[in-house]
């Protein structure tokens, strides 16, 4: 009975199923030409990240578009105090909030609950540079150099 319904449906809508591959190819080609948008709204960014004057050994940096800047969140790894985000995965041109993270072993062990013990990792970058970040930078088209000199303690005023 199912086969008969399928044959009947194919007879009724067969012309649509023949158009599906052609329509799909046309749609895919159009999307490939247009792209996902914003490719020329991205820029390469590189620089140094220091904490209390010393290079951050290992961490991550993220750039989040804000206040009318359109584009995806982008970022990269910090290694030996340096980072680089290439233009193909680049940062949105315009105003971006910056989040910097770096975790280190605390030297303590924590119980994982199943009898296993693991190293405790702690955030070494103050919250004002990551989860409460107020770091803002303006990214221009092309290549950008953005260095960040972070302080673990707020300066006295």
Image (spheres, rainbow, N blue to C red):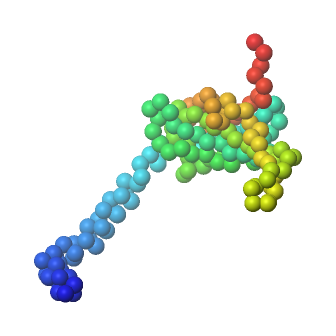
Work out whether 56 lies above or below 149.
below
In the rendered structure, the answer to whether residue 87 lies left or right of residue 30 reads right
- Residue occupying the point 30% across, 62% down: 27
Left or right position of 27 against 128 = left
Compared across the picture, whether 80 is left or right of 130 comes to right
Q: Is residue 28 above or below residue 119?
A: below
Residue 13 versus residue 2: which sits nearer the camera?
A: 2
Report whether 64 appears left or right of 114: left
Q: Quadrant of the N terminus?
A: bottom left
Residue at image position (87%, 46%) is 107
Depth order, front residue of 151/24 = 151
Could you say which quadrant of the image residue 14 lies in? bottom left
Outermost residue toward the right in this view: 107
Q: Is any atom of residue 80 visible in this view?
A: no
Observer-nearest residue: 122 or 70? 122
Residue 117: horizontal and vertical position, in percent? 81, 56
Res. 140 image quadrant:
top right
Find the residue positioned furthest to the left.
Answer: 12
Image position, residue 61 (x, y; %): 66, 42
Residue 29 spot, x, y in % from top left: 34, 63
Q: Residue at x 79, y 60 (%)?
A: 115
Specify the quadrant that holds the C terminus. top right
Across and down, in percent, residue 122 comes to 77, 43
- Can residue 5 be seen at all in this image of the molecule? yes
The number of numbered discs placed on residues in the rendered structure image is 0
Residue plotted at (41% across, 48% down): 37
Q: Is residue 155 placed above or below 23 in the rendered structure? A: above
């Amino acid at each position: 009975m199912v086969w008969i319904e399928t044959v009947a449906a194919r007879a009724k809508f067969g012309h649509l199923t023949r158009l599906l591959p052609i329509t799909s190819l046309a749609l895919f080609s159009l999307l490939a030409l247009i792209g996902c948008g914003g490719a020329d709204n991205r820029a390469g960014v590189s620089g140094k990240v220091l904490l209390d004057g010393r290079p951050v050994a290992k961490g991550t940096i993220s750039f989040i578009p804000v206040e009318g800047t359109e584009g995806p969140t982008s970022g990269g790894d910090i290694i030996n105090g340096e980072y680089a985000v290439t233009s193909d995965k680049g940062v949105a041109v315009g105003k971006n909030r910056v989040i910097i993270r770096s975790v280190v072993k605390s030297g303590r062990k924590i119980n994982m609950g199943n009898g296993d013990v693991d190293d405790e990792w702690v955030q070494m970058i103050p919250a004002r540079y990551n989860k409460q970040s107020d770091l803002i930078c303006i990214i221009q088209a092309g290549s950008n150099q953005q260095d960040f000199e972070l302080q673990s303690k707020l300066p006295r005023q």
